Amino acid sequence: MKVKDLATHRIEIIIKNSLESARYDLKLAQMQAMIAKRISMRYRVRLPYEIRQLFCKKCKRFIVPGINARVRIGRSNIKAIRITCLECNHIYRKIIK
Ligand SMILES: [Zn+2]
């Protein structure tokens, strides 16, 4: 296993844990997410898409749907969802393929 793969693997585990923690301790979840991000920067690995979308594009905080993020389905024909970060109220859209 390459170092980068190992780093990605560790990040995935940490993020999984932080999603669990978010249910009862958002601060702890934020901390874990920060650690994961730090690992990604240190090893220069790109975060997988599913993980990247858990970070607000504006305030960079870790956002968990149903906890500090609101997810709404768009009304238009285009299959898109609207994610609202409840930390900074930034809204962004995501197209579902
Ligand atoms: Zn935000």
Image (cartoon, helix red, strand yellow):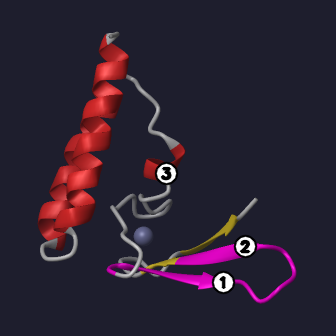
Q: Name above or below for residue 47 compared with residue 17.
A: above
Q: Position of residue 64 (x, y in %)?
A: 36, 70
Q: Tag 1's secondary structure? A: strand
The mark found on residue 73 in the picture is 1
Quarter that holds the C terminus: bottom right
Rendered image quadrant of residue 66: bottom left
CA distance separating discs 2 and 1:
6 Å
66 left or right, relative to 82: left
Query: Who is closer to the viewer here, 61 or 50?
Result: 50
Q: Name above or below for residue 39 compared with residue 17.
A: above
Name which residue type carries label 3: Glu
17 left or right, relative to 41: left
What residue sits 18% from the left and 52% below the top?
A: 32
Query: Who is closer to the viewer here, 62 or 21?
Result: 21
Residue receiving disc 3: 50
Q: Magenta region: which residues?
A: 67-83
Q: Tag 3's secondary structure? A: helix
Query: Who is closer to the viewer here, 46 or 13?
Result: 13
The answer to whether the residue bearing label 2 lies less than 8 angstroms from the nearest atom of ligand 1 is: no
Name which residue type carries label 2: Ala
Q: Earlier in the sequence, mark 2 or mark 3?
A: 3
Mark 3 nearby-residue class (10 Å; few <14, some 14–19, many ≥20): few
Name which residue type carries label 1: Ile
The mark found on residue 80 in the picture is 2
CA distance separating discs 2 and 3:
16 Å
What residue sits 42% from the left and 58% below the top?
A: 55
In contact (CB < 8 Å): disc 2 and disc 1 = yes
In contact (CB < 8 Å): disc 2 and disc 3 = no
